[in-house]
Amino acid sequence: MRTTPRPSRSPEGKNLVASARSHSLTQQHAAPLWVFSALWSGRPVTLHRDHETTRTPAQELQEKGREMENGVGKGDVPDDANEHCPGTQSEEAGKADACAGCPNQQICATAPKGPDPDVVAIVERLATVKHKLLVLSGKGGVGKSTFSAQLSFALAEMDHQVGLLDIDICGPSIPKMLGLEGQDIHQSNLGWSPVYVESNLGVMSIGFMLPDPDDAVIWRGPRKNGLIKQFLKDVDWGEIDYLVVDAPPGTSDEHISIVQYLQATGIDGAIIVTTPQQVSLIDVRKEINFCKKVGVPVLGVVENMSGLRQPLSDLRFVKSDGAGETDATEWALNYIKEKAPELLSVMACSEVFDSSKGGAEKMCHEMGVPFLGKVPMDPQLCKASEEGRSCFADQKCSASAPALQNIVKKLIKTE
């Protein structure tokens, strides 16, 4: 357990806290906190507009972002409210004569007004974190957590102080990918201590809290959001250069929560991971639009699994006949050594996913966001992730490591 004293807040951190308190923690592009309060408590959010009817929470978040840009949004009125409703953010909410008999009267009268006090605590806690990076994906299974893990390894090996926060509550794979399975979280008078891979790379995940790694986390949105808030408020990262946040796929409760909390502290932006085929890019477009509408800068898109690439000597060869397949690897490699040994240094490449429509690079050009680069599908990278180690530690990941290093250099230059 780390015993370093709690670092003092930087001047930037003090300014953030002061700004949060004086401006009620509302920023441009951010939805009113009562919307998020409703999400955390599980209440449905149904708002009335002259030109619109029922909205989902995510749609309401996007609409409020537009309203904040235009200087609108001085109090929202629930769809089933009485006439002359003073609005949910008014001091008269639930108390005015017009509220008598309204089905929302008790909720409005007892709901806390103003900012969530925990957000002030989050701003104070994260004042010692210089850069905050979100890693997102529109669809699961595209290698987002693998990228988050290797990005953290790369930043740490560049002598940065790094924290990796896993908010994929239902699928926490980060402990496995950093070789930390079976580790426990320790608590001190400074808060929760991250689990450390190296002295400059700390990790926090719900995976450290499960009695059995096979246990399913069956939580509704409010409970997930509560844990995310606790991670941000209570984890003692100390003075670090980068906090990498590995989010679940999609644009769900966890994304709305992490954006709302981090906007109060200052967020550098999001890195979006995809694969080349259209079935993945369709969802990535939604993810990019989500970021734009809630005011999170898109630092760039990474095309992962961009073709299979591995040394010819690592391939397995088979012979097929009517009776089935037989392994011919030894015969094939001996034949190559004898007849064409120079081929053993050649890299074999194959397009696994259809990228005939331009892949992520074309999509980025169309949507006006940076394209960070392509990472090939490398069996050695998969093996490194399974073993919980950095792909940069040796020369085994010769296909993927250089591509990842180039992406990290672009990121650091960008932000």
Image (spheres, helix red, strand yellow):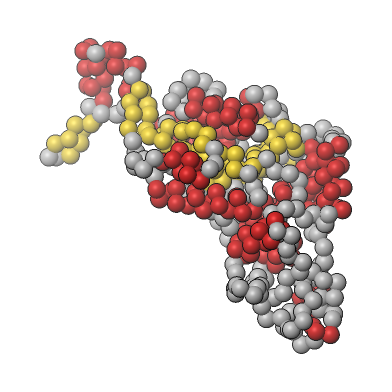
Q: Quadrant of the C terminus?
A: top right
Q: Nearer the viewer, residue 234 or 140?
A: 140
Figure disc tally:
0
**Residue that appears at 75% across and 53% down:** 27
Q: Nearer the viewer, residue 30 or 327?
A: 30
Q: Quadrant of residue 318?
A: top left
Q: Is residue 202 left or right of residue 332?
A: right
Compared with 336, 216 (above or below) is: below
Q: Position of residue 39 (x, y in %)?
A: 67, 65
Q: Quadrant of residue 105?
A: bottom right
Q: Is residue 69 left or right of residue 106?
A: left
Q: Position of residue 176 (x, y in %)?
A: 55, 39
Asked whether residue 284 is in view, the answer is yes
Seen as rendered, the residue at the extreme bottom is 101
**Residue that appears at 26% across and 20% down:** 333
Seen as rendered, the residue at the extreme left is 322
Compared with 286, 109 (above or below) is: below
Seen as rendered, the residue at the extreme front is 70
**Residue that appears at 43% across and 26% down:** 399
Q: Quadrant of the N terminus?
A: top right
**Residue that appears at 77% across and 66% down:** 74
Q: Position of residue 110 (x, y in %)?
A: 81, 74
Q: Is residue 340 left or right of residue 224?
A: left
Compared with 374, 256 (above or below) is: below
Compared with 362, 153 (above or below) is: above
Q: Nearer the viewer, residue 381 or 96?
A: 96
Q: Is residue 216 left or right of residue 183?
A: left
Q: Position of residue 289 (x, y in %)?
A: 55, 52
Asked whether residue 215 is in view, the answer is no
